[in-house]
Structures are given as C-alpha cells and as structure tokens.
Image: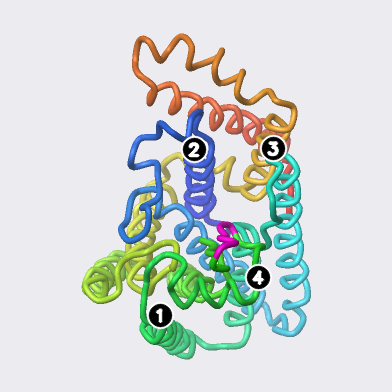
Amino acid sequence: MPRLASVDALRGLTVAAMLLVNNPGDWGHVYAPLLHAHWHGFTATDLIFPLFLFIVGVSLSLALGRQLDKGVASADLLPPVAARAARIVGLGLLLHLCAWWAFDLEHYRVMGVLQRIGLCYLAAAAVALWLPARSQWVLLLALLAGYAGLLGWGGSLAPLDNIASRIDTAVLGVHLYEYEAIGGRGHDPEGLVSTLGALATTLLGLRAGDWLRLGHAKRLPLAAIVLLAAGAAWATWLPLNKNLWTPSYVLWSGGLACALLALCHWRVDVRGGPPLGRAFGVNAIAAYAGSAFMLYGLVAAGWLEPLYRHGFADWMTPRFGPYLPSLAYALVFVALWWGVVRWLDARRIYFKV
C-alpha cells in the first residue's frame, strides 16, 4: 500500500497547531480556545496531543502492516522500533535539559511530550507486532476499564490529590512539571500513570490505521459517532480531563480524531485534494524539536521579550488590544517554521529521529 498523503497532511496540521498554541507572544493574553482546559473540560487545544498520538498509531499500523504482509518477522521489526523510541525519548530529555538551562528552572523535568510519544510508540508497536485485531480491542477495553478503576479507587480527582499525581510524585519527586515542596505534592500533565490513557489513544489509532490499510475507511465515521457518544456518556461519571487523560477523554478525543482522519482521507486520498500540512507532517518531530530549540535559544539570549515587544506589542496593542498581537506572534512563528519545512521538503531533506 502506498504512503497515504492524508496521514502526512493530518500529522502536519497537528504539529502546526502544536506550535501555534505553544508559542503565544504573551501567555497572559491568549484567546480561550488556544488554552487547555484548566482541569476538567475540553477545548480545541485539548484535541491536539491526542490527535498526534492517534496518528502515531495510524502510522504504525500502516508501516508495520506493510512489513508483516511481506513476511518480515515481528522479532526482526522490534529492534529498530525500540531504537527509534529511545531516540525520541532521548530528544525529549535533551529538550528539557535546554529548557532547564534557558529558563533557569529550579528542578529538571523528566517526563514530557516527546517522552510520552516515545513510550506510546514503543508499546503500541509491540501490540501491533504480536497481537491480532481482536486481542488489540480486548487490550484497549481492558486498559480503559483498568485505568478508570484505578482513578476511581484513588478517590479524589482534584489536582495534586488524585492517584495518578500521587504515584507520579512518589516515583519522580521534584522532577515533575509542578511540585509543591510544602506537603510534597506534585503533578505532571505528561506523567507516568496518565500515559496509560495516552496509550489507549494510540491503540485507537492503531485500529483506525488497520481500517485504512485494509480498505475499510468507511468504518471511521461510524467509529467517530460511537466514540463520541461513549465519551460523552462516560464523562457524566469520569470527567473529560487531559491532565489525567481520563478514559472519557480518550473516547471523546478519539471520536474527533476518527472524524478528522475520515475527512482528510476522503478529501486528499479519494478526491485528490491538496495535502495541506504535508511538509510539516514529513518532518514532524524535527519541526517540533527545532522550534523548541529556537525558543530556548531566544530566551537564553534575552531576545524573546524585546522581539515580541518591538515587533508586535508596542504598535499593535494600542490599536487592537493585547490579545491580537499575542496571536499574531504565534502565527508568524508557525509561518516561519512552515517556510523551513517547505524548504526542506522541496530538497527532499527529512530528519528521521
């Protein structure tokens, strides 16, 4: 099966959205849809990371499925997958080392976006290599039920008091995104325990990728409806929560991801529409990591604040208020990196982590 341009395009649009929400000019003035829900709830921004992990699952299914169909043994496919997962995690650790230095943080943060991607990539690949479709569904349901049971057994779902945060604090201590020295409580939105929910999202992508690979793309819209309904129903008991990556959040975001994949597949692969975002998609990790290194460099050099103030805030704020210049800076940041990845794509330069 040839590489699907729709998957590259959707991955690329997701990375562009990541850069947009991660790089406002002023964090104090960001339009509400471009912020994560503070705790319980769901905004457009809360779809971005699960959509990326969903696409990780889709891509794994397409890539590994092709190899398995050719008769390549599962045991031979695992070592390169494991090596790539280690490189992704290692890059995430390096990014956090740079952030620790650039922002002069008190503690080094261990977990993060790339670390979660690497862990989910490795686990989902092992599932794809050794479990048949029916067993994958069973594992997915068991994972959701087990994680829901763990959260329920833990009692409170409040920040810092929930069972996921308590376990993460016991394991990682001060090396979390948020840590209170008084009381010894902490939380990380990409923590170890909530990665169970993130893995479930990746497994949903694995199943969706199988449908694409086997010519069953028409199942995607129906799956979207079922997942959205199930997520909404489950949210009445266990709220939508990205920080905890609750099972209701897995189903709700998975339903939206199925709908977007179906739309993108129909528009690009079936109707021959332009694969908008493809340049970002084929250099996804490089764009994400490169933009982060750029940000940390600007901060360390002391250039970020004057760049935003002189380039955007000083002349835009009196005319339009403080929110528009903050958004304009983020859009220019994305446009700059769009130019970079377009230049790389035109020269067939692809950085594979």
Given residues 233 and 35, the one toward you in this image is 35
Q: Earlier in the sequence, mark 4 or mark 3?
A: 4
In the image, residue 179 lies in the stretch drawn in magenta: yes
Q: Amino acid at mark 1?
A: Leu
Q: Earlier in the sequence, mark 3 or mark 1?
A: 1
Report the residue that reaches farthest toward the front: 182
Q: Amino acid at mark 4?
A: Leu
Which residue carries the number 1 mark? 151
Q: Secondary structure at mark 3?
A: helix
Q: How is the image coloured?
A: rainbow
Q: Earlier in the sequence, mark 3 or mark 2?
A: 2
Residue stretch rendered in magenta on the structure: 177-182
Given residues 112 and 159, the one toward you in this image is 159
Q: Secondary structure at mark 2?
A: helix
Q: Residue at x 33, y 50 (%)?
A: 43
Q: Position of residue 99 (x, y in %)?
A: 69, 45
Q: Position of residue 231 (x, y in %)?
A: 28, 70
Q: Amino acid at mark 2?
A: Leu
- Badge 1: residue crowd in 10 Å (few <14, some 14–19, many ≥20): many
Task: Report whether 98 appears left or right of 67.
Answer: right
Q: Position of residue 91 (x, y in %)?
A: 74, 55
Given residues 46 and 346, the one toward you in this image is 46
Disc number for residue 172: 4
Which residue carries the number 3 mark? 296
Figure check: 287 above or below 248: above
Given residues 209 and 93, the one toward you in this image is 93
Task: Report whether 336 appears left or right of 251.
Answer: right
Q: Earlier in the sequence, mark 2 or mark 1?
A: 2
Q: Secondary structure at mark 4?
A: helix
Which residue carries the number 2 mark? 20
- Badge 2: residue crowd in 10 Å (few <14, some 14–19, many ≥20): many
